[in-house]
């Protein structure tokens, strides 16, 4: 569900730009990348206008009597970004001729996503905070302006099928490779080291343990 919400948020922005509901087209729509700084350093990694969605945690998780799990106050963030080579104000305000600024990106995203359940079985997104991202040196070099928007939702998770429950832990088998290490590959025809059976010929384990665990 978490991934579906992230992808649903950026899909709404894409649908709005493709349909003409907003007067500009998103050129970058992604989930929030781990290599954020690298993306700003490499000018080809993203193009403005851009939007990135991410999950930021949940306030509480409750096991219900029905076995369902209720996730309350799930926090999702959306970062929108614009850049403009003219000047810093144009990056935020935009410029005549359809060059959108970060302020309009943020306001439009709030209008598109607030109260939107994304077609999923979740509580409609509730807007919570809107913050101007403090510009880093890389952002200043790129003349980029970013705004972060926080949304909140809640949803219910169904329990897994009991048929998938872990069986009782009764037996433990261990194969050992003792120093000097190596020489225990159970299948030389496969790449990497294959765990051998205790009697697997030349590739057999140096030692083995097979334990029967006591049950209460």
Image (cartoon, helix red, strand yellow):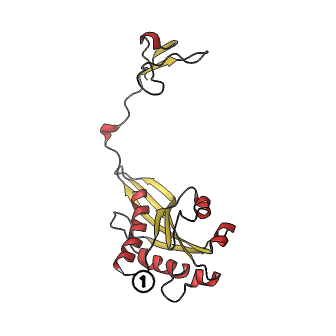
In front here: 138 or 115?
138
Percent x, y of residue 146? 58, 73
Q: Is residue 16 above or below residue 190?
A: below
Q: Residue at x 59, y 62 (%)?
A: 42
Q: Nearer the viewer, residue 9 or 61?
A: 9
Residue 128 locus on image (x, y percent) = 52, 73
Q: Give above or below for 10 relative to 209.
A: below
Report the number of numbered marks: 1
Q: Quadrant of residue 38?
A: bottom right
Q: Which residue lies at the image location 42% right of the left edge and 83% below the top edge?
A: 23
Residue furthest out toward the bottom: 96
**Residue 186: percent from the left, percent from the top?**
44, 18
Q: Residue at 45% of width from left, 73% of height from top?
A: 26
Query: Residue shown at 49%/88% (left/top)?
Result: 97
Label 1, residues with CA under 10 Å away: few <14, some 14-19, many ≥20: few
**Dot 1: what SS?**
loop
Residue to which mark 1 is pinned: 23
**Image spot of residue 13 (x, y percent):** 41, 72
- In the displayed structure, does residue 137 sit left or right of residue 23? right
Of 208 and 128, nearer the camera is 208
Q: Is residue 177 left or right of residue 215?
A: right
114 horizontally vs 102: left or right = left
Residue 134 in sight:
no
The image quadrant where one finds the C terminus is: top left
């Amino acid at each position: 569900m978490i991934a579906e919400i992230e992808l649903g948020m950026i899909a709404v922005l894409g649908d709005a730009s493709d349909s003409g509901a907003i007067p500009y087209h998103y050129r970058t729509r992604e989930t929030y990348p781990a290599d954020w700084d690298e993306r700003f350093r490499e000018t080809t990694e993203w193009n403005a206008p851009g939007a990135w969605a991410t999950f930021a945690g949940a306030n509480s998780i409750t096991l219900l009597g029905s076995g369902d799990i209720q996730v309350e106050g799930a926090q999702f963030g959306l970062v929108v970004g614009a850049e403009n080579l003219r000047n810093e104000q144009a990056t935020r305000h935009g410029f005549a001729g359809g060059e959108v600024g970060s302020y309009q990106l943020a306001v439009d995203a709030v209008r598109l996503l607030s109260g939107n359940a994304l077609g999923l079985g979740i509580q409609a997104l509730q807007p919570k905070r809107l913050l101007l991202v403090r510009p880093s040196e890389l952002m200043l070099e790129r003349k980029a302006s970013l705004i972060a928007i926080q949304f909140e939702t809640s949803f219910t998770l169904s329990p897994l099928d009991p048929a998938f429950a872990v069986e009782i832990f009764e037996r433990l088998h261990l194969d050992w490779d003792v120093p000097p290490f190596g020489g225990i590959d159970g299948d030389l025809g496969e790449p990497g080291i294959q765990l051998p059976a205790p009697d697997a010929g030349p590739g057999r384990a140096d030692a083995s343990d097979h334990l029967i665990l006591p049950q209460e």
